[in-house]
Image (cartoon, rainbow, N blue to C red):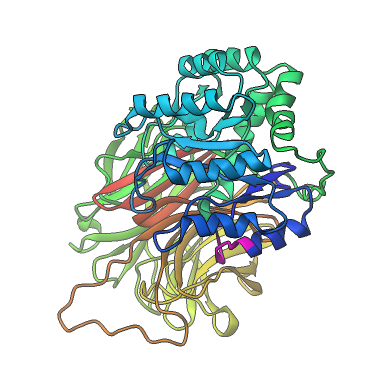
Amino acid sequence: MNQGEVTTTILSPGVTSPRGVITPEELVSFATNYPGRIIPAVRTKARRDEDFYGLLEKQMKMDGYGAMAEVLMYHSQKGNRAPEIVFYPDDNRVQAALNYALDRKWPFVVHIEFAAAECPRDKYMTGLKSMLTKYPEHPFVLIHMGQLDHADVRQLIEEHDNIYFITSSSTPIYAMNAYNDHWTNMFNDGHLSSDWKQLIIDHPDRFVLGFDMVWVEMWGNFYLSQIALWRKALGELPPEVAHAFARSNAERLWHLPPSPSTTSTQTAEMPAVPAITPLHPTRSIAGAGVWLFAVDDGNPQLALSAEADGKLLVGRLDVTAPSATASWQTVAGPADTDGVSIADHWHIFAHGYHWFVFSVAGDSASYLLKLDRDFQRLALVPVGHTDGPTNDMFLVAEPDGVAVGHFAPGYGHTIHRFDVQAKKTGQVKIGGGAFTHANGSSAIPVEGGYLLFASETLNPSVTSAVRLIKFDASWRPVDVRPMLDEDGTNAAMATAVRLDSDYIIVHLRVRTGVSPRQKTPPAPQPGSPLSDDSGTLMRLVLAPDGTIVSRETLVSDGTNRVHTALVGDLLITTWDETGAVRLRVDRIQ
């Protein structure tokens, strides 16, 4: 809330947090510690094994509640996370909740997804209007804009003096991350659309700025990105309209205390948390087999590299054009590796050249390739790694060349250092003791040295942390700290970019429900296939001190080999997904 400069949140128990589902007792205790900032709302979503009426009664008897959460009437199925729910406005459950809201003079928040294909729209609209007419002095609030368009909203407002709308789930950011495409979108090309803008100006007392924050991954950059978009939209409205929309309407309807002073975490030493907004829908990249990299070399068309049919490919892509396709050419293949297919590579641009390190099938050899901006070969040399397998390497720019990191099992990595002429200048082994780490790691240059995003293990069945290991310019370890370390979670393959503000954006592959530490995972059966090591694609934003300030799930499962690039204010994320290679473009604000 401080990061987004949000003063007050109406919060219901039952939302998820990193610790699990929040109970009514935990919520009231939490609100007591932040008076005026957290308003507990009675939960109305009963789980299958809960007594709905008992749930309501228990909370209504507790002190501290100041609102009632949304009452689900029609809710379409959301993948495997939320079932379809059908309760008509005259259902006993709905009426029981309404009676409590009437008694406390709390706004009655209605959840009806009118645009969902399965929703009997006319029956629900008739029921809603019946409630509005029966209780003309009581405020009814449609959450998520009711999935209605501006004409329907205008008609309801002009017919009923007691209907209001919460603008949750009504941004393109939400629509691109949601389970269906029925959500109302109030924006056009990053601005409030003209119809919605005029409707808000015509009826400034009927709209409440709000956000849908059900799952733990929503409390992070997903939240901050929507705040940034709405803050821009508020600036396009007359000041008195913007204030009513963002604050005073909610104060009036929910009888909130005056806006409290907030203790901002954004000081001169701590710049604002970057907001990351999707620019285009995620796209598949035809012609790329696996291991897709996007690299900025100053060309208006981004440089790409990938592997296909045992060869290393490069190409160009206009990432600002959603329908553009990549053009590919082969820059290395079995003819360069004694007939062995290429398998695994890393790609960076440094000192005016493209640099690649790639392994071969069997993990027995690796090569450093240097190309100019036109992808013409300038050098191809063996790396000379003998400490372990040559796959799952990383490549990082040094002040006078580049460094290849190859896995040294049980210890860490061997860093092979090359000058700008692709001549090897030495090697150093990193890791051991508190700094021991596994493959599936990566590094970026930082002031005075390098920052390694170190995987604990690539075994997908056991707990694995990703740790931040700081090295000086000679690759001597300076510091180590956990970045993401949760028992029962396998985190690995992190890649990152560092912003001018010193915030770091990290993408990584995460698997949950794995064997905790000190517990041996079940042994595979003889002849069984290798376990699937794909998982969730997660985005973290790290503050300059390394703490996580944002955590967001981009893809829920089936992802692997994620890579991250920065092109001006564009964040480019690439990854392998089941049956496809994917590229996503976001804008950083």
Give the image location of residue 279, x and y in percent: 48, 32
- Numbered range of the magenta stretch: 17-24
The answer to whether 457 appears left or right of 10 in the picture is: left
Q: Quick one: 210 or 23, which is closer to the camera? A: 23
Residue found at x 40% / y 71%: 513
Q: Is residue 465 visible?
A: yes
The answer to whether 319 appears left or right of 139 in the picture is: left
> Is 438 placed above or below 261 here?
below
Q: Quadrant of residue 89?
A: top left
Give the image location of residue 75, x and y in percent: 39, 41
Residue found at x 35% / y 27%: 123
Quadrant of the drawing holding the C terminus: top right
Q: Is residue 170 visible?
A: no
Q: Quick one: 175 or 132, which is closer to the camera? A: 132
Give the image location of residue 38, x and y in percent: 71, 50
Q: Residue furthest right?
A: 261
Give the image location of residue 156, x and y in percent: 51, 18
Q: Residue furthest left?
A: 527
Query: Tag count in the figure?
Result: 0
Q: Quadrant of residue 519?
A: bottom left
Residue found at x 77% / y 55%: 34
> Is 23 placed above or below 505 here?
below
Residue found at x 27% / y 47%: 580
Magenta segment: does it hold 22? yes
Q: Quick one: 348 or 269, which is closer to the camera? A: 269
> Is 39 placed above or below 480 here?
above
Q: Quadrant of residue 166?
A: top right
The answer to whether 97 appears left or right of 107 in the picture is: left
Q: Quick one: 429 or 513, which is closer to the camera? A: 513
Magenta segment: does it hold 82? no
